[in-house]
Amino acid sequence: MTDGRQVAGLPTGLRERKKRRTRDALLRAALDLFTTQGYEETTVDEIVDAVEVSQRTFFRYFAGKEAVVFAVQDMVESRFILELRQRPATETPFEAMRRAVLCAWNSIGEAIEALVPVELHMRTYQMIESTPSLLAAHMRRSVAMEEQIAGLIAERESLDLARDPRPRVAVAAFCGVMRVTGQLWGRSCDGSMDSLRTLTETYLDQLGPALAGDWRGRPAGTAHLN
Amino acid sequence: MTDGRQVAGLPTGLRERKKRRTRDALLRAALDLFTTQGYEETTVDEIVDAVEVSQRTFFRYFAGKEAVVFAVQDMVESRFILELRQRPATETPFEAMRRAVLCAWNSIGEAIEALVPVELHMRTYQMIESTPSLLAAHMRRSVAMEEQIAGLIAERESLDLARDPRPRVAVAAFCGVMRVTGQLWGRSCDGSMDSLRTLTETYLDQLGPALAGDWRGRPAGTAHLN
DNA sequence: GAGATTAGTGTCAGTCGCTGACAGTTGACA
DNA sequence: TGTCAACTGTCAGCGACTGACACTAATCTC
């Protein structure tokens, strides 16, 4: 009842539409308040006042103050999973994950815009990275995500997760780098989607060399922010 | 005033000793309650009742309920940083990190025992991994740690963190694998230090192969739990 | 050793996130 | 149209946490 699975399904009844409107209003009001005056500085009362519903209603739509923040993130992640499932078996696990993220980012734009302005979502992401308690929640979600991805990779390669460390290890390394780029992008001034994309690609390219240990030569692509 | 820097410094005055005793008592009582009846199920009131101090006092010693849980972890981490600084420059960054963890684990035992029974600390760690809110906090701390380690590695290799992705990338991959082993160990029945050590070594060994992409052969060492 | 100083503590009241219980309202459907 | 179920509001309460203020006791000063 609090999940966001209205995957392009325009609601049928009046009741459904009303619910959806309330939820969207709460979501937008919350993100607006969070990004302008800060997450911790915003109380649930302020959010419900803006939408003119009771606090109790807020907690019926969202599991908590935190859950609002990650509503959009949820969509992006499930899209990534979808893309990953569709990657051809010829790609290495690492390649597959890499392309799945980039494809997901390419195609998720409109779906986000239908819910909130993309620009608001970008600011939300930067807020997550700069708010300790949200960063914590983000990381916990990331752990759950890794577990899911590792399962997919193991399945893809017909391996037993319990016996073969490689799926988990590969996923951990991949997600680790993804988190680093996310953090750096969050800190940077340029909050554009393009900068995130190039930053991500650059960093992923460095994984192999970084582990090899021959750090004498200069890194491959070094034009980025921070 | 709430930090735990009594690094083998036996407190001088009566006041200092009293403080230390109160803090230790709170720490032990809290961990005991947490590990027996669960973190969320334990209230701060229960903890302070066990030690017979006021709630206000608890919050003067620890920033929050959460902070108690990670008090010992703090010691282990600062020990790791110490060990990492001492690794010879001839080792690759990855090697250095790997050995630093293992050395830290070897030498931290007594320091922990001085504070709480090591066995209690082990159970605490497993509790962290199995309690969502604590896992979140653990991950946030991990992020801060990664940043610090990346700084050390960059310094060690005379690189500019802002220009060269490799320190952050290598650290992200390393810490990612460390987290995976921590999770698996937390879930396993065998909560011994030895099992954690061998699990960690096995998984770290798989990082290179896992990224290479030639997953046809069977993994190197596969004897582990889960 | 007595008094002044100050760190440490307890008490109290209040905020904020969140939940259960119960009652009122409003779409849905026969 | 009336019944049913879903949705919402109100209220009361819990638990984590904080600020203010008074009190106790270790330390310092003379």
Image (cartoon, coloured by chain):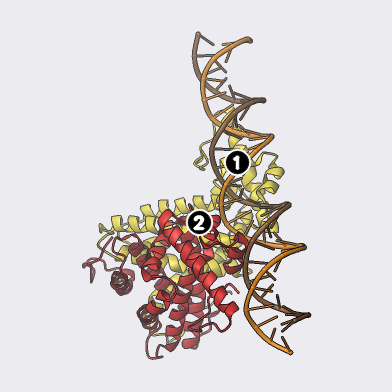
Chain colours: A red, B yellow, C orange, D brown
The front one of A70 and A210 is A70
State which mark lies toward you, 1 or 2.
1
Amino acid of disc 2? Asn
A40 to the left or right of B167: right
Disc 1 to disc 2, C-alpha distance: 26 Å
B142 to the left or right of B114: left
Query: Which of disc 2 and disc 1 is earlier in sequence?
Result: 1
- Does the image show residue A172? yes
What quarter of the picture does the C terminus of chain A occupy?
Answer: bottom left
Residue A193 location, quadrant: bottom left
Residue named by callout 1: B23
- Does the image show residue B93? no
Mark 2 crowd level (few <14, some 14–19, many ≥20, 10 Å Cα)? few
Amino acid of disc 1? Arg
Q: Position of residue B202 (x, y in %)?
A: 48, 72
What quarter of the picture does the N terminus of chain A occupy?
Answer: bottom right
Residue named by callout 2: B106
- The answer to whether the residues at label 1 and label 2 have Cβ atoms under 8 Å apart is no
Q: Position of residue B207 (x, y in %)?
A: 41, 74
